[in-house]
Every structure is written in C-alpha cells, then in structure tokens.
Image (cartoon, rainbow, N blue to C red):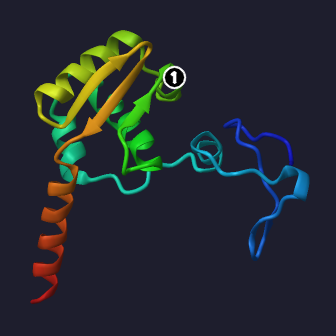
Amino acid sequence: MKENNNFGIKKLPWTEKGFSTSSNETKKITRQYRETITPYISRVPIPWIGEAGKLPGRTVVVALAILYVHGMNPKQDAVLTRYHFDKFSVSRGIVQRGMEALQEAGLIKYRKNGNSYVVTVLKLEAMTETIRGITHSGSDR
C-alpha cells in the first residue's frame, strides 16, 4: 500500500478489475475498512436534511454524521462513537443537544449504550418515497 494522503486514507493500487492486493493483504471488507476507503456520504435525502437544518445550533452536522454511519449499513441501526463525531469536529455537548433536537423533531430515535449512541433513522424511507413520487410524476409530462 502507498503512503497516506492528507485525509489519512491509504491509497490502494487500482486495476480494471478493482483494487489490487496481494494474497497476504486480502481482507474481508468490514465496516471499519470500508470507512477508510469511502470517505463520502452517499445519497443525502434533501427533505430529511432540510428538516435537520431548521433545528438550532450545529444539529445539521450531527445529522450528517448519522447519515454517514447509517449509509455504510442502512439495514441496521447506526452505532456512533466519539470516533465518528471527531471526523465532523463536534464536541460531546453538541452531539447530545443535536441528538435531543433530532429526536424531538421526529427524525431519529436514539439510546445511549455506554459511550456510543445507537440511532434509528426515522422518516427516511417515507421522505425517499415522496421524492421518488415527485420525480416520477414530474417526468410524465
């Protein structure tokens, strides 16, 4: 593997068939490994994040951290630790206030599990279906 870049992400050699690794470097891709090679939030639901943006303070940053972790395994609850919030430069106080605000707005349901938060993202599927309905009905014209 090559040197780390500015983001602390290891550069893997790329071939037409995908990432090239020797047999002794072959790993089962886990959530943590995927996180190091995909530092992007895919598919940000605009209505959901728009609702989070109406909330006070840096709640929207907490919401983006939740979507980042939720996007890695959308079929399960997101488990967020200090490690995830450090990536978004938010303190514990901001996280706590953001979680409470998002839960009061009905966007998430969370519980503390030691030092981590177990978060269920709510309304995401309903908002996604609304967007699909608008997109499909708009394309029929």
Look at the image and tell me whether residue 136 can be seen. Answer: yes
Q: In the picture, which quadrant includes the C terminus?
A: bottom left
**Residue 82 vertical position relative to residue 131 in the rendered view, above or below:** above
- In the image, what residue occupies the spot 77% across and 50% down? 11
- In the image, what residue occupies the spot 21% across and 36% down? 53
Instruction: Give whichever of 91, 84 is nearer the camera.
Output: 84
Look at the image and tell me whether residue 57 can be seen. Answer: no
**Residue 128 vertical position relative to residue 9 in the rendered view, above or below:** below
> Circle 1 is placed at which residue position?
86
Does residue 1 appear left or right of residue 46 in this picture? right
Name which quarter of the figure residue 65 lies in: top left
Residue sitting farthest toward the top:
93
Looking at the rendered structure, the number of numbered marks drawn on it comes to: 1
Does residue 111 appear left or right of residue 135 in this picture? right
Does residue 134 appear left or right of residue 16 in this picture? left
- In the image, what residue occupies the spot 35% across and 28% down? 118
Instruction: Give whichever of 74, 50 is nearer the camera.
Output: 74
Residue 67, image x, y percentages: 36, 42
Residue 70, image x, y percentages: 39, 43
Does residue 15 appear left or right of residue 111 in this picture? right
Instruction: Give whichever of 134, 6 is nearer the camera.
Output: 134
Residue 38, image x, y percentages: 58, 50
Residue 125, image x, y percentages: 21, 55
Q: Say what secondary structure mark 1 lies in.
A: helix
Name which quarter of the figure residue 114 lies in: top left
Mark 1: few/some/many CA within 10 Å (<14, 14-19, 20+): few
For badge 1, the amino acid type reads Asp
Residue sitting farthest toward the bottom:
141
